[in-house]
Image (cartoon, grey):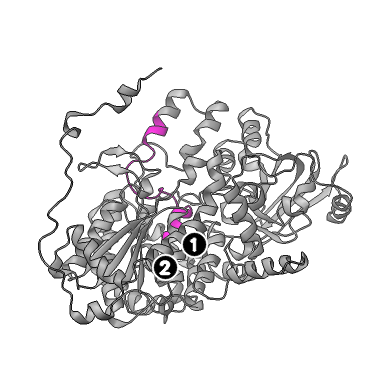
Amino acid sequence: MEISLEDIMCEAPEQSAPVHTAAAGPLGRLPITGDMLRSAPSGEIFGMTQNSGMGWNPLHLNRPQYLILGTMGGIRREDGSPLALGYHTGHWEIGLMMEEVAHEITAHQGIPFAGYVSDPCDGRSQGTSGMFDSLPYRNDAAMVLRRLIRSLPTRKGVLGVATCDKGLPAMMLALAGMRDLPGIIVPGGVSLPPVQGEDAGKVQSIGARFSNGELSLEEAADLGCRACATPGGGCQFLGTAATAQVIAEALGMSVPHSALAPSGQPVWKNMGRQSARALLHMEHSGMVMKDILTDQAISNAMVVHAAFGGSTNLLLHLPAIAHAAGLRVPTVEDWNEVNRKTPRLVSVLPNGPVPHPTIRVFLAGGVPEVLLHLRRLGLIDDSVRTVTGRTLGENLDWWETSQRRQDMRSRLREADGIDPDTVIMSPREAARQGLASTMTFPTGNLAPEGSVIKSAAIDPLVLNSEGVYRHVGRVKVFTAERDAIKSIKDGLIQAGDILAVIGRGPSGTGMEETYQLTSALKHLPFGKYVTLITDARFSGVSTGACIGHIGPEALAGGPLGRLRDGDWVEVIIDTVKLEGSVNLVGDGEQPGSPEEGVEILASRTAHPFLAVDPGLPDDTRLWAALQAASGGTWQGCVYDTDKIIAALEAGRQALGWK
């Protein structure tokens, strides 16, 4: 449709009023002294001018300043309805929480500042080119957040309000890197499930289920409309967003019982005020981030992750937080040890055994309740300090006898008729229910540097009596996720198949998340009998026999990149001993041995269609190169400045540059 320049440039009546050319300016005087004018940087004085210009009372400009950073997205009208949509519910109500924090700081004679770095939605970008920017966003956002913190040099402390898959890890990285500053993470909460319908994880498979005749068009449209039952908060399952909230609290970076609170509700808003008071106390007592984030705190977080059955994406995020804090980065061996000794205690979507939404985990007691069990088992160090100014042990002593604990657990019984001890179980009950430990790290001739599977998420029906999953089958190789999902929708994938999706690691796609595939396999009747292996990663809500993070990635010369259609692959996962392997075992009429697979792989070149995705943006290619020089996936995909500079210097010398 043609449109004239006059139509574009026409003015509404209220916008055609006379233009003013000067204004009187704020009333009052800056509270400055001669000494300030003589010795203070000009930026501090001009900052007062700016604050006055924005409308702050000039008489109060010498009060202490605190920065609130949020991942808010969208534009809400006063009644909460959308004027402009955000990327996801997780950042839609962040502004409400920031308001609560700001009111509390002001009430305590402080000056709140606020800044925003919005975040993408992994669910919205599944199967699209938007996924190429998902994981790289985390590093870039953390850098921007740190620059914002440093760009307000007069701030006394910072609160980071964030919720979802990349925004919250980025905020945690940013605060962890500000080691000499008081800081607190304020989790943005979770959304509620619909009274009738599906959670936001299952609903992402409606396309595959419709294509396979499992849903009608009317059913798919109805379910898709109602899955996000409330407008704010992260998804209702223990995916990456919810797991990151749990980890923030387990690290001591958040106030007690703050993870998984229902977004928008009074209990959630009150948590913002609690966090503001805690930050003020940290600043007054001289407590800073390096007092909170220690090697012991990282270890505690790993134990809590295992007890919750959290997302494998935290294998990328928790090492990155440790790196940002200047701490020892946990290794695969450390994760293995933690998962061997820590029982899984939480029954929650997506792993169950009962699919409780995260709001029920919150009401059952959340992180403090799990920590009580872990303390009794001697698995955590409760002497670590937290943002309350108290030790973790002191926080737990308060929680155990608190009215809040009683009220929350009673509310779960009253509202949903659920016994809280069936959501967060005792170790004895968890063992009786057969809850498998969280993760296994398979190796083999296709994964010489390792891989990861959430072994707790394998359907018990495909395990033998000893808890072992064994699958030997012919592989179907895909070099693009879109081809793999099309094959599933077209009915070309069957029970017994092994899917290999290769070249989708950091170098190929920015290490895309492949929940399109895993959600389809979970919710199709034959999916439990299919194994997926890839150098990409999975959503925290993924379930099934899905092995990711395979290293080396195919485009870095990894043997995964030399697979061909019809090869025999053997996958073994022992969910009890937490041992596993993924091996090529032949290419003939019958499967052979891993040793034969080694010879076959050595004789081959890379798959003919293996290539960097043609749509990969240059900034993601740069991210991939920088994180590879810094240690790669198993070091958390970080930017290690010293290693990057050393690599550049070595290259310069090799080229003979002066």
Q: Nearer the viewer, residue 646 or 428?
A: 646
Residue extent of the magenta highlight = 222-245
Callout 1 amino acid: Ala
Please check the rendered image and state whether residue 383 is part of the magenta-colored stretch, yes or no.
no
Q: Which mark is residue 430?
A: 1
Residue density around tag 1, few if under 14, some if 14–19, many if 20 or more, within 10 Å: many
Up-down: is 378 above or below 416? below
Say which of marks 1 and 2 sits in front.
2
Residue 270: x %, y % from top left? 24, 61
SS category of the residue bearing label 1? helix
Residue drawn at point x = 18 percent, y = 32 percent: 16
Callout 2 amino acid: Leu
Q: Is residue 367 left or right of residue 45?
A: right
Residue drawn at point x = 33 percent, y = 39 percent: 195
- Give the residue number, with chain letter if any, for mark 2: 175
Gap in Å between the C-alphas at discs 1 and 2?
Answer: 35 Å
Residue drawn at point x = 30 percent, y = 43 percent: 75
- Image quarter in which the C terminus is found: bottom right
Up-down: is 295 above or below 6? below
Q: Nearer the viewer, residue 32 or 299?
A: 32
Q: How many marks?
A: 2
